[in-house]
Image (cartoon, rainbow, N blue to C red):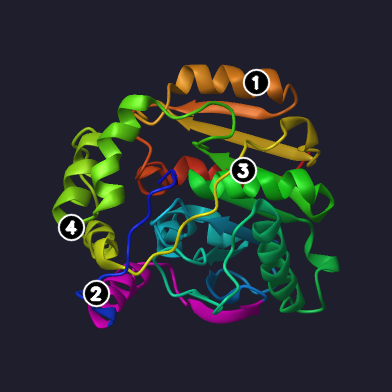
């Protein structure tokens, strides 16, 4: 989900056990075995869920706002976990199992870059023999996660072999005003009903996986913090060897054709495409096979 200034507030009705049960139900659909690790970073503990061969090239994935790392299970099952070690990250401050450090909130893009530096360091340190023999890191993100990934790639291009941006928001174009107005009640005062109604509208009534939809509804009462927002990343700084950008044809958050043209103009060497017949919010689920193919395509 794109992130704007309003953010869910802590609620006395939040049930950690109910949220965790919904979270584990989605994680249980991943191709096993799954290794869940809590990484220490300067900004708090970060939960990373990993699967795939331990000695395979690392693939680090950031979810959209409010989606949790569990959304990447479909891509892992569709083939990503056969060729890569998939590391899916819960964003600090968002719904998930990451825990912000007291008094050390993420406030700026620089903070996000420092946080992701620490995550990548831990992921690479855990590889058998270190990062060298396993090839470059692929960093992928969806929606708000793509915005974070693009900012990271602009500042740390030397750390990445590939950048994959899935329907990125606030990277090449802005959000449609009508979309923001439709999302505002859910963002300001989220309820399970508002989340379900919004997702039904945004996905144009697409059949959504029940376990994932239940988890999305559970995020309504999750104690949130204000997300980091800011300017668009500088596309001229995305000097990663390979950049893939995929847009969702039916996305309501922006005009996918306009966004794709803007991306092509900003990144003439990138591989840019439009995924037909899919919306924005459930993209990692509804287009998992094509996303996995893009994520795992050999570098050349």
Of label 1 and label 2, which has the lower sequence position? 2
Residue holding disc 2: 14
Question: Mark 4 falls on what kind of element?
Answer: helix
Residue drawn where x is 23% and y is 48% of the image: 208
Q: Which mark is residue 164?
A: 3
Which mark is in front, 1 or 2? 2
Cα gap from disc 3 to disc 1, whole angstroms: 14 Å
Graded by Cα atoms within 10 Å as few (under 14), some (14 to 19) or many (20 or more), the crowding at tag 4 reads some
Q: Is residue 285 magenta?
A: no
Residue holding disc 1: 264
Q: Is residue 280 found left or right of 53 in the rendered image?
A: left
Q: Position of residue 215 (x, y in %)?
A: 27, 63
Q: Name the residue nearer the viewer: 179 or 26.
A: 179
Residue holding disc 4: 192
Q: Is residue 23 found left or right of 289 in the rendered image?
A: left
Task: Establish if 51 lies above or below 214.
Answer: below
Query: Which residues, given as a range, are shown in magenta?
Result: 17-41
Graded by Cα atoms within 10 Å as few (under 14), some (14 to 19) or many (20 or more), the crowding at tag 1 reads some
Question: Mark 2 falls on what kind of element?
Answer: loop
């Amino acid at each position: 989900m794109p992130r704007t200034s309003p953010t869910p507030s802590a609620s006395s009705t939040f049930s950690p056990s109910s949220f965790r049960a919904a979270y584990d139900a989605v994680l249980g659909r991943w191709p096993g075995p799954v290794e869940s690790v809590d990484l220490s970073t300067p900004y708090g503990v970060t939960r990373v869920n990993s699967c795939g061969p331990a000695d395979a090239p690392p693939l680090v994935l950031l979810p959209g706002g409010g989606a949790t790392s569990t959304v990447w299970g479909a891509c892992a099952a569709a083939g990503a976990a056969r060729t890569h070690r998939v590391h899916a990250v819960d964003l600090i401050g968002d719904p998930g199992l990451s825990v912000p450090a007291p008094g050390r909130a993420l406030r700026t893009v620089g903070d996000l870059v420092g946080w992701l530096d620490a995550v990548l360091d831990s992921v690479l340190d855990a590889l058998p023999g270190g990062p060298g023999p396993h090839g470059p890191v692929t960093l992928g993100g969806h929606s708000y996660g793509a915005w974070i990934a693009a900012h990271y790639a602009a500042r740390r291009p030397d750390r990445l072999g590939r950048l994959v941006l899935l329907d990125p928001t606030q990277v090449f174009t802005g959000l449609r005003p009508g979309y923001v107005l439709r999302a505002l009640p859910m963002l300001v005062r989220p309820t399970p009903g508002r989340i379900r109604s919004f997702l039904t509208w945004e996905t144009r009534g697409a059949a959504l996986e029940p376990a994932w939809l239940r988890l999305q509804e559970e995020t309504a009462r999750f104690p949130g913090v204000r997300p980091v927002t800011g300017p668009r990343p500088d596309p001229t700084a995305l000097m990663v060897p390979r950049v893939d950008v995929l847009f969702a044809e039916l996305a309501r958050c922006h005009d996918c054709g306009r966004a794709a043209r803007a991306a092509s103009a900003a990144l003439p060497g990138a591989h840019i495409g439009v995924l037909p017949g899919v919306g924005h919010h459930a993209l990692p689920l509804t287009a998992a096979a094509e996303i996995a193919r893009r994520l795992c395509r050999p570098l050349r």
